[in-house]
Image (cartoon, rainbow, N blue to C red):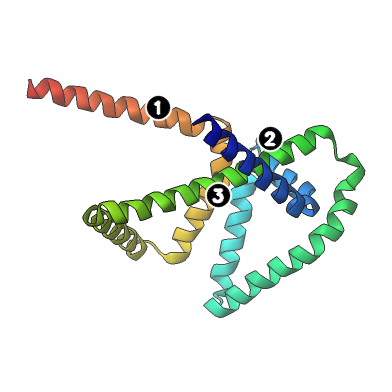
């Protein structure tokens, strides 16, 4: 078991090093984005929601077709991929890269690799469920997709996308400041109270 853990740790360390090398040109931008996503300043959540709202209002106003929206998105990504490595050192100053920043960049890359491993692990578990318990797999997947389809029918596509994007952008900050843990613990306590009350009624 320990040997397997060591092997897994070595693979994660190797993949983290590779990712660091690939994203080195984006290092300053990633660190700046990390500071915003973790709410290092109290006005960062408002700025995130405000910027997201402006972008989605612009999309709503322009109402581009799917092909136009996709083309513009890919074009912006290509421009960013070309310009960021060139402009980032001039804007942030490559000589200001400290040991602390390097350590944080390493942590971010490590977290990205671990997140990728978790997603792959969930996918493998789903495939294993399909092989071992096909009826349960079929029922759970169909019911989940029906629920998502119903939500999509009730809520406007663009507004639903706005809510999802806003939540994902705020998630690191909510996690960093312990807000998710706090409310999850409150929900767990309430559920336990309800279960205890139900047990008492049954007695």
Indicate whether 185 appears above or below 29: above
Where is residue 35 drawn, in percent x and y? 70, 40
Label 3 with label 1: CB-CB less than 8 Å: no
Where is residue 163 drawn, in percent x and y? 48, 54
Helix, strand or loop status at disc 3 = helix
Helix, strand or loop status at disc 2 = loop
Give the number of marks. Answer: 3
- What's the CA distance linking mark 3 and mark 2? 25 Å
Q: Residues within 10 Å of mark 2 (few under 14, many from 20)?
A: some
Is residue 178 visible in this depiction of the protein?
Answer: yes
Indicate whether 27 appears above or below 139: above
- What's the CA distance linking mark 3 and mark 1? 27 Å
Q: Residue at x 82, y 33 (%)?
A: 99
Look at discs 3 and 1 and give the one toward the viewer. 3
51 lies left or right of 167? right
Q: Which mark is residue 116?
A: 3
Look at discs 3 and 2 and give the one toward the viewer. 3
63 lies left or right of 134? right
Of the image marks 1 and 2, the number of the one nearer the N terminus: 2
163 lies left or right of 191? right
Helix, strand or loop status at disc 1 = helix
Residue designated by label 1: 185
Where is residue 61 drawn, in percent x and y? 56, 71
Q: Residue at x 43, y 53 (%)?
A: 123
- View extreme (right): residue: 95
Where is residue 121 drawn, in percent x and y? 46, 48
Residue designated by label 2: 40
Of the image marks 3 and 1, the number of the one nearer the N terminus: 3
Q: Quadrant of residue 22?
A: bottom right
Position of the C terminus, as image quadrant, is top left
Q: Residues within 10 Å of mark 1 (few under 14, many from 20)?
A: few
Label 3 with label 2: CB-CB less than 8 Å: no
């Amino acid at each position: 078991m320990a040997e397997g853990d060591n092997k897994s740790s070595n693979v994660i360390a190797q993949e983290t090093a590779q990712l660091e090398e690939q994203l080195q040109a984006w290092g300053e931008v990633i660190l700046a984005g990390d500071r915003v996503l973790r709410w290092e300043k109290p006005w960062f959540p408002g700025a995130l929601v405000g910027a997201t709202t402006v972008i989605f209002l612009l999309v709503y106003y322009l109402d581009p077709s799917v092909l136009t929206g996709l083309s513009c998105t890919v074009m912006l990504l290509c421009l960013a991929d070309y310009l960021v490595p060139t402009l980032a050192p001039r804007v942030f100053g490559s000589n200001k890269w400290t040991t602390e920043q390097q350590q944080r960049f390493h942590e971010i890359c490590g977290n990205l690799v671990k997140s990728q491993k978790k997603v792959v692990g969930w996918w493998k578990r789903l495939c294993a469920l399909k092989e071992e318990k096909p009826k349960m797999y079929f029922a759970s997947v169909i019911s989940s997709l029906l629920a998502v389809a119903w939500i999509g029918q009730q809520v406007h596509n663009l507004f639903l996308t706005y809510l999802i994007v806003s939540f994902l952008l705020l998630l690191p900050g909510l996690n960093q400041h312990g807000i998710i843990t706090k409310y999850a613990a409150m929900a767990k306590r309430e559920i336990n109270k309800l279960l205890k009350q139900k047990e008492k009624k049954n007695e």
